[in-house]
């Protein structure tokens, strides 16, 4: 006769086997997720690929919550190590009769040597096609350096490139700087939030609408002539036969030359859910000046308001926030030799994304600016 005591070892053995089966199954599932996430083409970091997998599988809130828990405010005070850096790859250019004015320093006191001074890094026919400037982001985070890139639309033309996941699918434009996509490359930078973001960003390119364009949303519009514009959709910019692509992201950060007054108070629909608009973190933005010049800003220790202020000081009349977080901010300019692979240079010292990032397929969409075969006349915005 089997007693209750005799059955206990059997039950415990079954329980151990059940727990072991659950553990093995969980490990297999985790391993499958990791393999699937890391199998995405491109050279994004492991953390970035895992986060993107989570956001793409309904875990946007969990990923954002984890970012908020792990976020640490950047230190205040101090000076940049080595001072304001002289840009790598700076070149001589013919002096323009009316070049851009130096950027005003946002830090207290006198500017550091070379702070806010424009330096030519790419030329076309001896004229400055791409210029960069470096400055500290504000009066508190004085050990950090932000990069500003100024593109002359008369000498360079823009093109929106798709990512393997965002927007995914098959496109004429390349997902990487490979083959013909390298020819004449002058600069690249990141796009906006993922198309699956709760802000429901629109995307149009090559005659196809991947995500519906929202009225009033901040929109970076590239025309068929390669020039860019920024504005609120269907009020300041709209669809037409000359529109090559539209990339939407959140709300306008700068409009009429003024920083949006809700930059410090707006919610996630305006400035995104990553950590929050008041957090100081790597951010990027893009805008156009009254003369048509195109401005990209990328750097660390930026709030939404300080990003808007730098765009404004660079002469932007309409501008928008692009992406957030150091894994995605990627301003790079290039020297393209007659033979061989172009040489890329980081826009700011703490930029985590390598200049070689776009030589392999990117998981997310991005922008490239190419030297024009001949200069063109650009209309004012």
Image: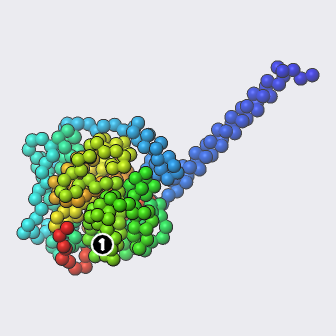
Instruction: From this view, report whether residue 71 is shown above or below residue 165.
Output: above
Q: Position of residue 288 (x, y in %)?
A: 22, 63
Q: Residue at x 79, y 25 (%)?
A: 9
Colouring scheme, one of rainbow, by chain, secondary structure, one colour: rainbow
Would residue 262 appear left or right of 364 to someone viewing this image? Answer: left
For the point 79% across and 24% down, which residue is it? 8
Residue positioned 19% across, 43% down in the render: 138
- Say which residue label 1 marks: 223
Q: Could you say which quadrant of the image residue 132 lies in?
A: bottom left
User: Which is more toward the observer, 284 or 373?
Assistant: 284
Can the viewer see residue 2? yes
Q: Position of residue 306 (x, y in %)?
A: 22, 47
* Helix, strand or loop for disc 1: strand
* Residue sitting at the far left: 97
The quadrant of the rendering that contains the C terminus is bottom left
Residue drawn 40% across and 67% down?
204
Residue 10, image x, y percentages: 80, 28
Outermost residue, right side: 1
Q: In the rendered image of this protein, does residue 180 appear above or below residue 198? A: below
Q: Residue 359: x and y, percent?
A: 39, 64
Q: In the shown orientation, is residue 176 left or right of residue 20?
A: left
Q: Is residue 175 visible?
A: no
């Amino acid at each position: 006769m089997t007693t209750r005591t005799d059955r206990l070892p059997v039950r415990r053995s079954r329980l151990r086997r059940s727990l072991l089966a659950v553990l093995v199954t969980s490990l297999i599932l985790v391993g499958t997720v990791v393999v699937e996430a890391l199998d995405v083409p491109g050279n994004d970091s492991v953390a970035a690929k895992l986060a993107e997998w989570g956001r793409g599988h309904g875990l946007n809130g969990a990923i954002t919550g984890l970012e908020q828990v792990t976020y640490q405010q950047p230190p205040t005070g101090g000076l940049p190590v080595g001072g304001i850096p002289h840009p790598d790859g700076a070149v001589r250019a013919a002096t323009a009769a009316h070049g851009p004015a130096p950027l005003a320093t946002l830090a207290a006191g006198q500017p550091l040597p070379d702070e806010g001074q424009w330096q030519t890094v790419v030329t076309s026919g001896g004229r400055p096609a791409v210029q960069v400037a470096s400055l500290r982001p504000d009066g508190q985070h004085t050990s950090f350096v932000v990069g500003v890139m100024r593109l002359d639309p008369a000498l360079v033309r823009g093109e929106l490139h798709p990512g393997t996941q965002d927007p995914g699918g098959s496109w004429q434009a390349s997902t990487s700087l490979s083959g013909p996509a390298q020819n004449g490359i002058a600069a690249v930078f990141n796009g906006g939030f993922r198309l699956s973001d709760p802000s429901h960003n629109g995307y149009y390119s090559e005659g196809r609408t991947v995500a519906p364009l929202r009225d009033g949303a901040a929109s970076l519009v590239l025309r068929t002539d390669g020039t860019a514009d920024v504005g609120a959709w269907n009020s300041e910019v709209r669809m037409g036969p000359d529109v090559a692509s539209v990339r939407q992201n959140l709300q306008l950060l700068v409009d009429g030359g003024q920083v949006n007054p809700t930059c410090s108070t707006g919610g996630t629909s305006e400035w995104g859910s990553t950590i929050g608009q008041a957090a100081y973190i790597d951010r990027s933005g893009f805008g156009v000046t009254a003369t048509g010049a195109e401005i990209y800003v990328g750097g660390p220790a930026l709030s939404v308001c300080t990003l808007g202020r730098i765009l404004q000081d660079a002469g932007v009349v309409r501008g928008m926030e692009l992406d957030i977080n150091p894994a995605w901010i990627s301003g790079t300019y290039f020297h393209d030799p007659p033979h061989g692979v172009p040489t890329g240079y980081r826009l700011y010292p703490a930029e985590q994304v390598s200049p070689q990032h776009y030589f392999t397929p990117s998981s997310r969409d991005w922008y490239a600016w190419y030297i024009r075969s001949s200069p063109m006349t650009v209309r004012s915005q």
